[in-house]
Image (cartoon, rainbow, N blue to C red):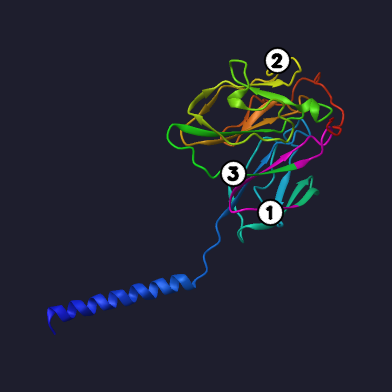
Amino acid sequence: MSIRSVLRCLFVSAALIALTATAAAQAEPAAPAAVRVRVAHLAPFAGSDSATIAVHIDGAAVGGTMAYGSHTDYVAIAGGAGDRLIEVLRDGEVVISETYTLADGDTSVVVVGDDNVVPLDLLVLAENVDEPGVGHAGLRITHAAVLGATIDDTKVDVCSQTGELFNGSAAGLRYLRTTSNRLLPIGDYDLKITRTDAAGDCAGPIAIDPPVLTLAEGTKTNLFLVGDGHNRVLAVFTFADGLIGDDGPPPSSGTLYLPVLAASS
C-alpha cells in the first residue's frame, strides 16, 4: 500500500472517530448547571452565642449547628434548579418552613429577625453573576438590622464620608431591603449608616459606623447591616470577614423595641 493510501485511511478513520464522539455527546443530556447555597445566621434573638440554629434544605442539614454571625461555605445542591424546602430549626424545633425556587448559580440563604420586634425570617438572595472587571469591585448592601418599632422606623441612609448618599443610593433603605449590585472603583470606602431624617439626606444620627471597607479588584461583597441594639450591638457583616464591630451583647441599657407594625403610608 502506498504512503498516500495509508494517509487516506488514517484521515478517514480520524474523521469517523470525530463524528462518533460528536454524536455521542449530542445524545447525552447536558448536565444540570451547578446550584450552590451558603447559609448565614444573622438573627439576633438572644445575646448568647449559644443561641444557635440549624438550616435544612430538602431535609439535609447545611453546615450543622450555627451560632450568631457564623456562615457556611457554598454547598452544592443535588438535582439542579427547582423548588427546595428550606427549614430553620431552633432548639431542634422547626421555626421556619418555606419552599423557595433556587436558580442555577450561587444563592445566599440568610436567617434574620430577633423573634421579638420582628419574626424570624429568611432572606434568599441570588448572587450577582457579572464579573466586576479590571479596576473594579462589586458591592451590595442589605438591611437586616432591627432598628425600630415600625418598618418606617427602620429606614436608614447609606452615606459616604463626605456626608452624601453613597454612590447615588436612595434615601430610606428599609429593613429587609437590598440595594442593587453596584460596580465601584477599587479602594477604601468609609461608609456611615444614619437614621433617615426629615432634615435631609444623611442628616440623621449615626446608627452604624463600620470600619473602612476595602474593595479589592474582582471581588463581589455582600455587606449586611445587622444587630438590634439590645441582644446584639448594631454592626455589619460580610461573608469574607464575618461580623465586623460586634464583640458580643451590648450593655444592658440597650433600647428594647416594641413589635414591628405595618409600614405607614
Looking at the picture, how far across and down is residue 221, in whole percent? 56, 35
Residue 233 in view, yes or no: no
Image position of 119 (left or right of 238):
right
Q: Residues within 10 Å of mark 2 (few under 14, many from 20)?
A: some
Image position of 242 (left or right of 137):
right
Frontmost residue, 98 versus 89: 98
Of the residues under marks 2 and 3, which one precedes in the sequence?
A: 3
The mark lying in front, picked from 1 and 2, is 2
Query: Which residue has dot 3 on it?
Result: 127
The mark lying in front, picked from 2 and 3, is 2
Q: Amino acid at mark 3?
A: Glu
Query: Which residue has dot 1 on it?
Result: 101
Which of the 4 image quarters holds residue 13?
Answer: bottom left
Of the residues under marks 1 and 3, which one precedes in the sequence?
A: 1
Circles 1 and 3, Cβ within 8 Å, touching? The answer is: no
Find the magenta span and give its range.
99-121
Looking at the picture, how far across and down is residue 133, in whole percent? 45, 37
- Give yes or no for residue 263 being in the magenta stretch: no
- Where the N terminus falls, by quadrant? bottom left
Circles 2 and 3, Cβ within 8 Å, touching? The answer is: no
Image position of 38 (left or right of 154):
left
Vertical order, 113 against 5 (above or below): above
User: Image point 62% across, 53% down: which residue?
Assistant: 103
Vertical order, 5 against 236 (above or below): below
User: Image point 85% across, 34% down: which residue?
Assistant: 262
